[in-house]
Amino acid sequence: MSAYFEPPELTCQGLAELITDYLEDMLTPEDRARFAKHVAICTNCSIYVEQMRATISASGVVPVEELPAETRSALLATFQAWKAKPAD
């Protein structure tokens, strides 16, 4: 008999790390369900998801190849610094 393990609830930081995959419909069904469950109970994350959708809609899509090298480097450095920051 195999035991059923429910995946842990998604945290706000976990949601932030998954938002791109969520918006691009790249999450597994299990992660998509965890994401939706968290958004349903977390007002701040719900607002964050809508802000991201609005930002994408307003800015359109810029292919990576069209970004100037310095812009690409600055964005990557910002993301890496954010990822390296300890969780509160």
Image: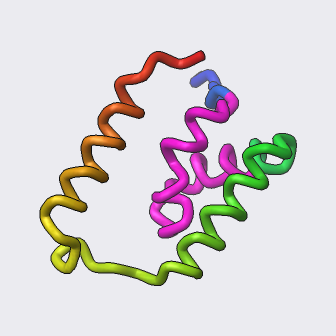
Q: Is residue 35 left or right of residue 76?
A: right
Q: How far across and how far down the image is residue 86, in percent?
A: 46, 16
Q: Is residue 73 left or right of residue 10?
A: left
Q: How far across and how far down the image is residue 61, in percent?
A: 40, 81
Q: Quadrant of the C terminus?
A: top right
Q: Quadrant of residue 10?
A: top right
Residue span colored magenta: 9-36
Number of numbered markers = 0
Q: Please tell me which residue lies in front, 3 or 66.
A: 66
Q: Please tell me which residue lies in front, 73 or 8.
A: 73
Q: How far across and how far down the image is residue 70, in percent?
A: 16, 59
Magenta stretch, overall SS: helix
Q: Residue at x 48, y 69 (%)?
A: 24
Q: Please tell me which residue lies in front, 48 or 8.
A: 48
Q: Is residue 35 magenta?
A: yes
Q: Quadrant of residue 52?
A: bottom right
Q: Is residue 88 above or below residue 32?
A: above
Q: Quadrant of the N terminus?
A: top right
Q: Is residue 37 magenta?
A: no
Q: Quadrant of residue 3?
A: top right
Q: Residue at x 56, y 35 (%)?
A: 14
Q: Is residue 84 above or below residue 13?
A: above
Q: Is residue 69 above or below residue 44?
A: below
Q: Residue at x 27, y 79 (%)?
A: 63
Q: How far across and how far down the image is residue 6, in percent?
A: 67, 29
Q: Residue furthest left?
A: 69
Q: Is residue 4 left or right of residue 14?
A: right
Q: Is residue 59 above or below residue 49?
A: below
Q: Please tell me which residue lies in front, 34 or 82.
A: 82
